[in-house]
Image: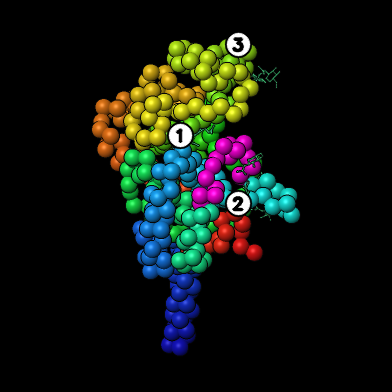
Amino acid sequence: MSFQSNKMDTFGYFWLVILATLGAINSSRADLQLNFYAKTCPKAETIVQDYVHEHIPNAPSVAAALIRMHFHDCFVRGCDASILLNSTSSSGNQTEKAATPNQTVRGFNFIDRVKSLVEAECPGVVSCADIIALVARDSIVVTGGPFWRVPTGRRDGLISNASEALANIPAPFFNFTSLQTFFANKGLDLKDLVLLSGAHTVGIAHCSAFSSRLYNFSGILGNQDPSLDSEYAANLKAKKCKTINDTTTIVEMDPGSFRTFDLSYYRLLLKRRGLFQSDAALTTSSTTLSYINELLQGSRQDFYKEFALSMEKMGRIDVKTGSSGEIRKHCAFVNS
Ligand code: HEM
Ligand SMILES: *[C@@H]1O[C@H](CO)[C@@H](O)[C@H](O)[C@H]1NC(C)=O
Ligand SMILES: *[C@@H]1O[C@H](CO)[C@@H](O)[C@H](O)[C@H]1NC(C)=O
Ligand SMILES: *[C@@H]1O[C@H](CO)[C@@H](O)[C@H](O)[C@H]1NC(C)=O
Ligand SMILES: *[C@@H]1O[C@H](CO)[C@@H](O)[C@H](O)[C@H]1NC(C)=O
Ligand SMILES: *[C@@H]1O[C@H](CO)[C@@H](O)[C@H](O)[C@H]1NC(C)=O
Ligand SMILES: *[C@@H]1O[C@H](CO)[C@@H](O)[C@H](O)[C@H]1NC(C)=O
Ligand SMILES: CC(=O)N[C@H]1CO[C@H](CO)[C@@H](O)[C@@H]1O
């Protein structure tokens, strides 16, 4: 009898350990939640929202930069604010910020100011990664796009590596296949690719992101990308990107409504006026082309709903939750 009960105890203990271990794994992999800071920092989301609503109207161009920042953060090591870490002279390693795709990312100071307001309210509670996600959503709202409830509870990463940014962020010269692969690597499908590219309805690009389409297509000097509307190309060459080496001039990606979050980006794609090869590439697959047509046949509200769902999906890429990572005190540095 005693042997039997002993065996039972051992068995029971075994399961207890298993369950406890599963619980621990579960808590470090906990899911994001709506209003994660309800108890620990109830004003957090309002502070972020108020700051965005108050300051973006004075500097509308930063809205687009902040939307893009969330994308670049999520595609490298997950949405963990690794994009915000500064390279330190002591470690000698270059962080994501230093990588080519990030050289045109702006808005770091904006995030720092939001973070300091949130820190003043509840020190050490709200992650920089959640701040980026909330600021991106609020920036979309301010430019006229959809509001959706952003799940929170992301924690900040400890590592940032410039070469990983290069390896994970799609480039403007990518073709359809490469775009599909890079998105699939992050668990995003072709629908997400079309919808999220729709963020190019706001913001600007530097000539260097697409001047090869005007002057050096396929590496042949003097060649122009035949898939780019020739009238638009001529206009860009005459008025904007006057030389192949122009690295400073900026161009509206959705001319005429580059501060408004609407469907016009997709209309431009069908007119062969998408600015990057990666934009034009969305019309080269029948799957994505028919999805673009569907979006244009639907209402702006339909697009908003679908876009918000894809943004939420992007915002969940490889998030750190529970006890992994940390809550940074200053977004540019890991806690010492
Ligand atoms: C599909 C692959 C994508 C490629 C190849 C790409 C590439 C680029 C490039 C090269 C720029 C111009 C940067 C500059 O020259 O200043 C840009 C701007 C921008 N991108 Fe993308 N992007 C992609 C997807 C996305 C996604 C998924 C989002 C967000 C959901 C996004 C949001 C933006 C925004 C808002 C801007 C304007 C930034 C500003 O005004 O500073 N992009 N993108
Ligand atoms: C981090 O680096 C950026 C430039 O990459 C610089 O503007 C900023 O001042 C730095 N932040 C801090 C807190 O040193
Ligand atoms: C810099 O590199 C060292 C050594 O590989 C690593 O321990 C550290 O986490 C890196 N720092 C950042 C910010 O990635
Ligand atoms: C950064 O990532 C690259 C490519 O994965 C790797 O070779 C390199 O060692 C990493 N650098 C640091 C400092 O960890
Ligand atoms: C797309 O680009 C990749 C990488 O440059 C290349 O290997 C592939 O052949 C290209 N695909 C098409 C269909 O052009
Ligand atoms: C034209 O494209 C080729 C291939 O990408 C590149 O090697 C060359 O440097 C480019 N020429 C100029 C002037 O940018
Ligand atoms: C552009 O840069 C290339 C190589 O860097 C140089 O050979 C060429 O003369 C420059 N072209 C113009 C128009 O400035
Ligand atoms: C914001 C930021 O850190 N930008 C950097 C991007 O990379 C270039 C070149 O590596 C740096 O000069 C910028 O400061």
In the rendered structure, which amino acid carries the disc numbered 1? Gly
What type is the residue that disc 3 sits on? Answer: Gly
Q: Residue at x 41, y 66 (%)?
A: 41
Earlier residue among tags 2 and 3 = 2
Assign a secondary structure to mark 2: loop
Residue in view at x 42 percent, y 53 percent: 51
What residue is at 33 percent from the left and 30 percent from the top?
263
Residue 147 x, y percent position in the rendering: 32, 47
Q: Which mark is residue 203?
A: 1
Q: Answer yes or no: disc 3 within 8 Å of ligand 6.
A: no
Please check the rendered image and state whether residue 101 is part of the magenta-colored stretch, yes or no: yes
Image position, residue 220 (x, y; %):
62, 13
- Some atom of ligand 1 lies within 8 Å of the CB belonging to the residue at label 1: yes
Q: CA distance from mark 2 to mark 3?
A: 40 Å
Q: Nearer the viewer, mark 2 or mark 1?
A: 1
From this viewpoint, is residue 324 visible? no
236 lies left or right of 201: right
Residue 17 shows up from this direction: yes
Q: Which residue is mark 3?
A: 222
Indicate yes or no whether the magenta region holds residue 116.
no
Q: Main secondary structure of the magenta part?
A: helix
Q: Nearer the viewer, mark 3 or mark 1?
A: 1
The quarter of the picture showing ligand 7: top right
Residue tagged 2 = 85
Tell which residue pokes out farthest to the bottom in this image.
2
Q: How many marks?
A: 3
* Chain part drawn in magenta: 96-111
